[in-house]
Structures are given as structure tokens and as C-alpha cells.
Amino acid sequence: GDIVVAAHHIPCGICHYCKHGNHTMCTMFKRTNIYPGGFCQYIRLSSDHIQNTTFKIPEGTDLLRALFVEPLACCIRAMDRMPHIEGDIFSIVGAGAIGILFVKLIKLAGLRAVVIDMDEKRLDMAKNSGADHVINPSKADLLSEIARITPIGIDSAILTVTNKFTVTDALSYIRAGGQINIFGMGLNTYPMPVDFNRIYKSELTIKSTYSATPDTLARSFDLIVRDRKIDVGPLISEVLALSDFKKGLDLMLERKVYKAFYRL
């Protein structure tokens, strides 16, 4: 049979949410999934999955690279939801796999990228991936460093790590009229104070992006697999046996790998 890469959720495309571009809020989107689950040896895809979120992988393609189609599609949707013009400066908080994918998209669009992280090795990866500037806030004053890059502030901030510190920082270095995208949120993130006076008087926009759509999945597939304009090779590490599942999770938690890959 064919080798494919597939994503799990499907929007209906015709409901009130979908008509407003909020496809990931669609009731059908939230209800649909692969069966019985992503860590199973065999899965069943519906006809809707086959038509909308499944892509045939050409012969000779590195299958590990195709695994990044869904994550990159989520990043593409976030970029779609952040209006920008030539010369804009984006900041990316967090230089994990998602942060690196954002760097690659931002540079592909001809924009400037500033990556913020406290892990020097990951900042090196960001720099090698095309980041124009990298900042380690544990070693340098974040606001001073950004002021050297742009006197008016960052145009768009992407938070792949969201907590009271990264939100407060972003509200401090974003330019008047700028935008902040909440892309990553921990399960145990508690309510945090937000300076609404700053948001109001500076006309700031705070939005979030959750998951991907059939359109961004198709564009992601093209960028990684068909046209190969996005190289995810540096994010790929060793492939582990499924029996080493915990080892892979531990390697990720210890920030020794970007993604854990398993062989069935």
C-alpha cells in the first residue's frame, strides 16, 4: 500500500466557526480523531481524513522529515493569523522544535527573527537555522538587547513558552500597535496578571493559535516534502524502539533531543 502522513482533526468547513476562519473551534474538528490513537501500531482513518488531512509520501522521501508536516502546519496557521509586512521583526520565545520551525518560516518569508531562550545549545541551533539575533535573558538584559535591535520594539511576538514571565516581557518589548501570539501553553498554567492599560493605550493585540487546518497541512507538506524549502533535518535525532518510550520522553524533558522518534 501507500505510505502516508496524516493529521488527526478535520473541520466541517461550513459552520459559523469555519466561515470566520476559526476552523479549530469547529465542533466536528474537536470531535474527529484517528482511531484508536496515535501510539498504536495500526490506526483507522475515516474517508474525511483521507480526503482532507492525509498525504501520500513520494518514494525515496525520508519518513522522519514527513513527521514534521503537522507541527509546521500549526506554525503556518499562526503566521497566517499575524499580519506582517516586509522588514517586520518577529521574536520567538523558546528555541525548541516549534521555535526552530518558526525561524525557518519567518526567514522564508523574508522577515527578521529574534530568538529568546536560556539554553545556549538551542540558541546555536536557532542561529544556524537563520535567526538574525539570539538572546539569552539569563546572561543579558532582554529589554536592552532588543532596544539595540529595534528602537521601537518587536512587531510580532510568538510565545512557544507562555508563563507570567514571558508574557510580561513580551508586553514590555512589543512595539505600539504590535501583536503577541500565544502558541504554547502548559497544562498547569495559572491565571496571570496582565497590564490592560498598556494593551489599551498601545493598541496591542493578543491572540492564540491552536492546531492546523487542511489548507495549512497541504502547504506544510509542500514545503517539507514536495518542494523541500523547509529543512527539518537538524531537528531529527536517533530513532528509539517503542519499548524505550520513557527514555525518549526523558531525553526530551532533559532537552537533549528536540523530538523523540520511535520505531514500531
Image (spheres, rainbow, N blue to C red):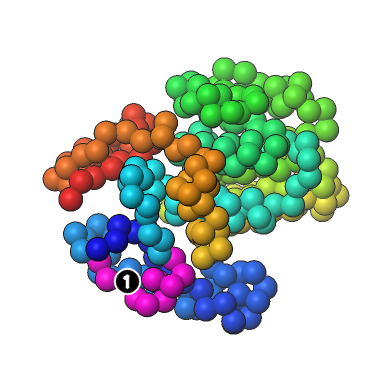
Q: Is residue 17 above or below residue 179?
A: below
Q: Quadrant of residue 33?
A: bottom left
Percent x, y of residue 204: 77, 50
Amino acid bearing label 1: Leu
Percent x, y of residue 55: 41, 61
Question: Which residue is most to the top?
Answer: 139
Q: Which residues are magenta?
A: 43-53
Q: Is residue 26 above or below residue 239?
A: below
Nearer to the camera, 249 or 163 = 249
Question: Which residue is most to the bottom?
Answer: 15
Question: Which residue is most to the right?
Answer: 201
The residue that appears at 51% across and 52% down in the rendered structure is 222
* Residue 17 in view, yes or no: yes
Percent x, y of residue 213: 53, 64
Q: Is residue 180 above or below residue 137?
A: below
* Residue 190 in view, yes or no: no
Q: Tell me the SS state at disc 1.
A: loop
Percent x, y of residue 96: 46, 36
Nearer to the camera, 243 or 143 = 243
Residue 152 part of the magenta-drawn span: no
In this rendering, would 9 be left or right of 176?
left
Q: Which residue is mark 1?
A: 45
Mark 1: few, some, or many residues within 10 Å (few <14, many ≥20)? Answer: some
In this rendering, would 141 be left or right of 259?
right
Residue 49 part of the magenta-drawn span: yes
Q: Quadrant of residue 236?
A: top left
In this rendering, would 66 be left or right of 93?
left
The residue that appears at 30% across and 41% down in the rendered structure is 260
The residue that appears at 55% across and 50% down in the rendered structure is 75
